[in-house]
Amino acid sequence: VSIDASAQPAAATAPVPAWHPSDCEHCPLRKLPLFQPVNATELALIGELKRAELWREADALLIKEGENDGPLYTLLAGWAFRFKTLGDGRRQILGFLLPGDFIGLQQKMGDASSHGVRTLTPVRVCSFRRDALWTLHRELPSLGYDLTWLAANGEAQVDEHLLSVGRRNALERVAALLLTLKARHAAHEPAAWQDGMQLPLNQQHLADAMGLSLVHINRTLRELAQRGLLHWPRQGRLHLPDPSRLAALARLRWPMPLSPRPLI
Amino acid sequence: VSIDASAQPAAATAPVPAWHPSDCEHCPLRKLPLFQPVNATELALIGELKRAELWREADALLIKEGENDGPLYTLLAGWAFRFKTLGDGRRQILGFLLPGDFIGLQQKMGDASSHGVRTLTPVRVCSFRRDALWTLHRELPSLGYDLTWLAANGEAQVDEHLLSVGRRNALERVAALLLTLKARHAAHEPAAWQDGMQLPLNQQHLADAMGLSLVHINRTLRELAQRGLLHWPRQGRLHLPDPSRLAALARLRWPMPLSPRPLI
DNA sequence: CGATGTATTGACCAGCTTCAAGTAACGTGG
DNA sequence: CCACGTTACTTGAAGCTGGTCAATACATCG
């Protein structure tokens, strides 16, 4: 996929392009069982609040760390991650963002603490008007409820991640992360199970997500491979031959329950 | 403070006691600048949804891990903490709850992942009706917005915690945690700065929060004390003589900005 | 006074980090 | 088409941070 992102104006300065709310109806994401159905009224309001559909290249900064009035996005295609930085270069990846995830909730709600968002692949996003959060609540409480749901669900995901980093050892951490990503990925491409999944991460990303060093991530991956729990050829697709055994190692429930989520 | 919690019926089975919404107006928490003002309409709705005011003793389980239709509380007085467990006894404390914090948002929003809540001190809580979350959104979107704010703010707090556990060393972690608790505590008792703060935690709690062992927490505290950054006599009040130096050690912004939060 | 929970300290060890070097894959320009 | 630069991955050796085990001190409470 070759994308020239510079041809796209930045979100903040872009003139409002021709946009038809009806495009929302054809959003292929909504057809997935991963997402809750919406009624026509809700769909119409979401369409109204939409400002533009944008492309960004891989490794692009969607939201700057520390920014407190950043943009509001829904990720339509591609992967990204949230992160925080410690000033001397130490970086902690807080979580990964997959299609359908809402981006920027924290930025809009108080300036307390803030994180950055960076793309992992070329990405397509919906950008929303700055006042969308409040409008959604005011006009359609059901969508306001969905926003609370998304925020609470986001916290639950970070909770689980914190459990890993705080109390699991390296093998367990990597097992838990890869299984979680596999489960979330499978909800988008149920067909791709057989030939493994294309993970757009390198070992540095894994290290920064797990609070480990790059070197130790490498050793841990090789250990998992040696135990027959993982095949991940260079630049190739990730295979997890025995998810149940991995889940037992990580003390993780498997299969992982994924409840249908709102898509805004 | 001597409290016999067994004299109070469990929340789920309690008959609705005599309750006057006007009590909400006199809630001493609302007088603190930490909390956003509410108008009469909002106050009335909150009062309506309130079910009871309950006491719990110290070290009581407010919410069981794994429970997915648990109660909904606002913490009125006392401290508590959220935690997750790994099955073989390993426990990760996810965060600490202080008066004004809303408890149980995650439990109500999907069953994905769940955590427990345990009190640190004797505690007074408001319990809400099960459908309060939806009613708040439907009847008063401004309160629905507040709920989203609270959920997003909760995620931001866990984000910061995850940064500590993932990328700070033991000294930095403890410094960051104690400073954060000091800042939050000070918002409730601005007067108590001089003679230190009463922290209702033991070293095991610190260890489980920071992803460290009990022994290493002890050594870290003594190291901080030796550097003159901390005085914490047994069972006594915690003094942080030089918060700025602590903050520099932890690479934390100081003074810590605390924006006014909604109180529901 | 003994029982219990919490804090403290030492000795030893292991998991993980750091440093360093080497290999493989890929894109670019000559 | 090859030389080269760049990036990601791999591996070894050494060392440090933090874990485990175990014993002791201290405090509170019945």
Image (cartoon, coloured by chain):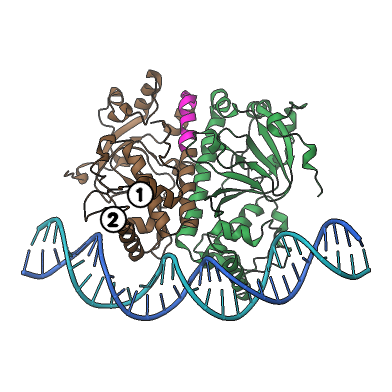
Chain colours: A green, B brown, C blue, D cyan
Residue occupying image coordinates x 31% and y 48%? B240
Q: Is residue B141 magenta?
A: yes
**Amino acid at the residue labelled 1:** Leu
* Residue sitting nearer the eye, C20 or A77: C20
SS of the residue under disc 2:
loop
In the rendered image, is residue A100 in sight? no
- Mark 1 vs mark 2, foreground winner is 1
Would you call the spot at circle 1 few (<14 residues within 10 Å), some (14-19), or many (20 or more)?
Answer: many
**Amino acid at the residue labelled 2:** Asn
Question: Which quadrant holds the N terminus of chain B?
Answer: top left
User: Quick check: A53 above or below B160?
Assistant: above
- Horizontal and vertical percent for residue A195? 73, 63
* Magenta extent: B138-151
Chain of the residue displaying label 1: B
Query: Which circle's residue, 1 or 2, is located before the other in the chain?
Result: 1
- Horizontal and vertical percent for residue B66? 43, 52
Task: Give the residue pinned by disc 1.
Answer: B178
The extreme top residue here reads B40
Task: Give the residue pinned by disc 2.
Answer: B202
- Horizontal and vertical percent for residue B199? 28, 48
Label 1 vs label 2: CA separation?
A: 13 Å
- Horizontal and vertical percent for residue D13? 56, 81
Would you call the spot at circle 2 few (<14 residues within 10 Å), some (14-19), or many (20 or more)?
Answer: few
Q: Quadrant of residue A14?
A: top right
Chain of the residue displaying label 2: B
* Residue sitting nearer the eye, A127 or A239: A127
The prevailing secondary structure element of the residues shown in magenta is helix
